[in-house]
Image: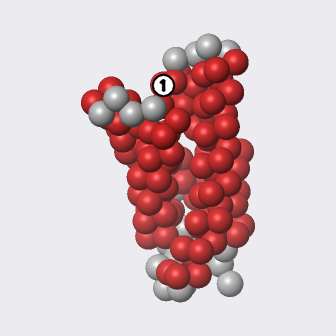
Amino acid sequence: MRYPTILKAQAASVASTAIDFMVTIGCVEGLHAWYLLATVLGNAAGGTTNFYLGRHYVFRAPKQGAPAQGVRYFIVWLGSMALNAAGVCLFTQLLHLNYVYSKAAVSLLVGVGFNYFLQLHFVFKKP
């Protein structure tokens, strides 16, 4: 059965987000790291997972040059990381939400509204 790209992207996003959250929560709760640093580290781990899944499973683009895709992905990832960090900071500091709830809300907004479309039309765009 063939699933639409957006459904595969959401499945990859769920897996990547699970890695992201495990690293974030592990850093804060286990290592007592600052929640914002933990957010960035979690985002890096989730981003690495998402690049691999996007390249091989979601967009099926392993024949395209990995270095070029990696550079494009890194650019998008930097924007995503900045939006995630700013959003988590905003929700946590101004709205006084727990960092986990803040991260969940912001991750969803950034994942659907920013990451998916840029990966589809820029990072893994078919020639």
Q: Is residue 25 left or right of residue 77?
A: left
Identify which residue is drawn at 62% across, 57% down: 78
Residue 106 in the image, given as x and y percentages of width and height: 62, 33
Kindly identify which residue carries mark 1. 100
Point out residue 121 in the picture as x, y percentages from the top left corner. 71, 67
Task: Classify residue 78 as left or right of residue 14.
Answer: right
Q: Residue at x 48, y 25 (%)?
A: 100
Q: Is residue 57 above or below residue 63?
A: above
Residue 16 lies, in percent from the top left, at 44, 48
Q: Residues within 10 Å of mark 1 (few under 14, many from 20)?
A: some
Residue 104 found in image quarter: top right
Where, quadrant-wise, is the N terminus in this rendering? bottom left
Tell me if 105 is positioned left or right of 34 in this view: right
Q: Nearer the viewer, residue 73 or 31?
A: 31
Residue 85 shows up from this direction: yes
Looking at the rendered structure, the secondary structure element under dot 1 is: helix
